[in-house]
Image (cartoon, rainbow, N blue to C red):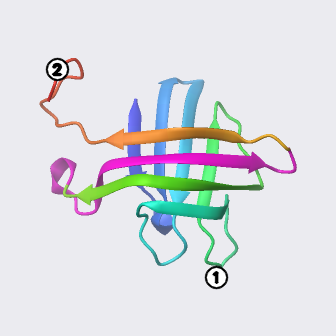
């Protein structure tokens, strides 16, 4: 199961779940009052301070996550449109890279996420 959703505070949450115990989610959001568009978002926080202009980045998986994290992400593509069922503001395509550091650990978790709307009538094995 894959999903993408614009959640509260204008944060895009993308999740993938293979089983009840095997899942990952990535949440990315622009500074308050802005739209998530292509560009680099530095000094991102799991929970930015109220009133700050810092972006949001939170990554969790298999029941693990960070209480305090910092990182950055780059939105490479963000296309919004009517999407499934004609819902205004839905995500048509999204692609981003990210890097997050947890607490005071020196290593970072990095990766890339992509999301695309698949038409209802389309089968994954078919070229739509």
- Residue designated by label 2: 126
The percent coordinates of residue 101 (x first, y second) are: 75, 48
The percent coordinates of residue 102 (x first, y second) are: 78, 47
- Residue designated by label 1: 51
Task: Work out which quarter of the rendered image holds the C terminus and state it.
Answer: top left
Q: Is residue 89 above or below residue 65?
A: below
Left or right: 88, with 71 as reference point: left
Q: What residue is at 35 percent from the left and 56 percent from the top? A: 78
The image quadrant that residue 6 belongs to is bottom left
Q: Are marks 2 and 1 in contact (CB under 8 Å)?
A: no
Tell me if mark 2 has few (under 14), some (14-19) or many (20+) residues whose alpha carbon lies within 10 angstroms of its own.
few
The percent coordinates of residue 48 (x first, y second) are: 67, 68
Which one is in front, 106 or 5? Answer: 106
Q: Is residue 26 above or below residue 8?
A: above
Left or right: 114, with 28 as reference point: left
Q: Is residue 20 above or below residue 74?
A: above
* Count of marks, rendered view: 2
Q: What residue is at 45 percent from the left and 59 percent from the top? A: 7
Q: What residue is at 65 percent from the left and 62 percent from the top? A: 44
Seen as rendered, the residue at the extreme bottom is 51
Which span of residues is magenta-colored?
A: 83-105
The percent coordinates of residue 28 (x first, y second) are: 53, 56
**Tag 1 secondary structure:** loop
The image quadrant that residue 121 belongs to is top left
Q: Is residue 62 above or below residue 101?
A: above
N-term-proximal mark, 2 vs 1 = 1
Which one is in front, 41 or 87? Answer: 41
């Amino acid at each position: 199961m894959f999903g993408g959703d614009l959640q509260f505070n204008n944060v895009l949450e993308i999740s993938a779940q293979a089983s009840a115990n095997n899942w990952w989610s990535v949440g990315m959001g622009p500074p308050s009052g802005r739209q998530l568009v292509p560009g680099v978002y530095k000094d991102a926080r799991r929970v930015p301070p109220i009133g700050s202009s810092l972006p949001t980045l939170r990554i969790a998986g298999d029941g693990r996550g960070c209480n305090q994290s910092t990182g950055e992400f780059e939105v490479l593509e963000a296309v919004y449109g009517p999407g499934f069922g004609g819902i205004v503001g839905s995500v048509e395509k999204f692609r981003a890279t990210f890097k997050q550091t947890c607490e005071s650990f020196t290593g970072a978790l990095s990766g890339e996420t992509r999301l695309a709307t698949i038409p209802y009538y389309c089968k994954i094995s078919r070229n739509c």
